[in-house]
Image: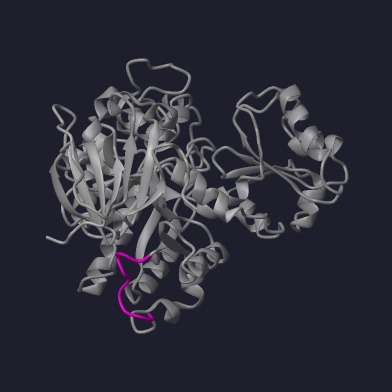
Amino acid sequence: MTEPGLWIRGVRPLDGHRHALGGAEPIDVGIEEGRIVAIAPAIDGPRRRGGDELDGGGAWMLPAFADSHLHLHTLAQQRGVLRLSRSHGEAALREALLGRLAGGDGVDWVVAQGWHDPLPEALVPAPRLWLDRLAPERPLWLFAADHHRALLNSVALRACGVPPDGHSGVLLEDAMMAAWREVPPLPADLDGVIADLHRLGITAVTSFDGSRAREVWAGRAEQGELPLRLRHSVPREELLADPGRWSREGMAGGDPDRDGAFAALWVKVFLDGTLGSRTAWLKGDYDDAPGERGDERVCAAERQEIVDAVVGSHLQLAIHAIGDAAIAAAIEMITAVEQARGRPGGAAPHRIEHVQLLDPADLSRLRASGAVASLQPCHLLEDAAVGPERFGSRCRHVIPLRSLREAEVPVTLGSDAPIESADPWVDLDAAVRRVDRAGRFPGGWIPEERVDFATALAGRTSAAATANLLPARWGRIEVGAPADLQLLACDDPREVRSIDGARLVALLHRGRPLRLPDGTEPS
């Protein structure tokens, strides 16, 4: 046995793979070169002389968390963005914007995020006019909570190349993204967002940001300044513009290193929009809008073009699909890629992001495709407010965690931050209890789709290893597993609803303590 350089003493192990809550006896865990090399019953005396020891004090030891779907660079930028209250009142919105407008030099963009439907009556039907009265000379951009819609004043529209005369000031989906590319990049607090993730017990993330953001984070990894395991995507426009760069022949350095700090593994494709904006692509009409079925954002011919480009690349597909029609189309694309390749594809599995409204008739096809279902249970906290009226009886199949598990579809979990909180405990609680934020469903929204705590925990730890191309046995507490670990002082992790209740007292990444039991952070 390799002699451990660090012993963590007197901890109670808990993971979603081997260790359970009931009757967990304290153990001592030995770590060397970033991996667990020894697990032994706890003893009172020192394990060795001259080595480092960390007293766990009876805390729970869990694997560190992965977030399989967030927007890291956007999170870094949003540390300086105005966060809007969930209150829909005109007075609250006015006060928040005036407070931000009072700063700056009178020219800077004011970017805010977080408004929800319904808009205050004063902003309907043309938010632009209300925003113009508030800021006639300074550009305003207000993202919706789902980041698929935005409200702009005339100055902002004009700066983005959109004629403001007669425009409502509301931009959706692709039109919004095209306009956003004209906005000067916001400052990004890279170190700050990493510290935020560490405070949540997170050491691995998969991010779906744009090309410029990917290059920033890849650069930090090359410089050894990335204390995270970061996996990233490539926008489909980038793949289609230069397929040779992403071909297997053009891939530098061979297959990605599972233990590496950074890898770009998927091409991101948006097949539809969101439930909140009624742009999720459905097989049947929205219950509250007959004749409307959402947005098919990529037509069949374009989907085939993407499939052809992916076939010759080392990339896999990561497909945003919320509505049942979008999910069905995503399965078809993934299946077509694998059939055309006729050989093993990329190093990571294909993924379908969100899988929010699944037609049960597509379950077997999804399982056969081999794709990972990447879900964000925390979305039900808000979507329960509008889901029943929009999906009707189809709600039985919204965020279908239990159905996916029973069908043996691999599942990984994430937050979609900053759309929702990056707090992993909020996500776990949503998966287990399915209680919405307003308490409309105290017994759980669609309780048939609840899963137990161990299953939810695995979705954030051991099950995330394969989905995100993390090292083998990542997310487990066993000899040989990577030492990405956290210590919690809570009484019962099953009762934790947020990071405050978890009482995180230590976090290790690659065997190195990032946070210590006294709450300090090593320099």
x and y, in percent, of residue 373 in the image = 30, 48
x and y, in percent, of residue 498 in the image = 42, 29
Q: Nearer the viewer, residue 262 or 162?
A: 262
Q: Please identify the residue farthest to the front as the structure is shown.
A: 49
Q: Is residue 372 above or below residue 251?
A: above
| Res 423 quadrant in image | top left
Q: Is residue 478 above or below residue 313?
A: above
- Residue bounds of the magenta highlight: 251-260
Q: Nearer the viewer, residue 83 or 355?
A: 83
Residue visible at 59% across and 31% down in the picture: 116
Residue visible at 76% across and 58% down in the picture: 161
Residue 64 visible? The answer is: yes
x and y, in percent, of residue 175 in the image = 63, 53
Residue 165 visible? The answer is: no
Q: Nearer the viewer, residue 252 or 338?
A: 252
For the N terminus, the image quarter is bottom left
Residue visible at 21% across and 71% down in the picture: 344
Q: Is residue 386 above or below residue 511?
A: above
Q: Nearer the viewer, residue 495 or 239?
A: 495
Q: Is residue 253 left or right of residue 151?
A: left
**Magenta stretch encompasses residue 480:** no
**Magenta stretch encompasses residue 253:** yes
Q: Is residue 144 left or right of residue 68?
A: right
Counting every numbered tag in the picture gives 0
| Res 390 quadrant in image | top left
x and y, in percent, of residue 106 in the image = 87, 47
Secondary structure of the magenta portion, mostly? Answer: loop
Colouring rule applied to residues: one colour
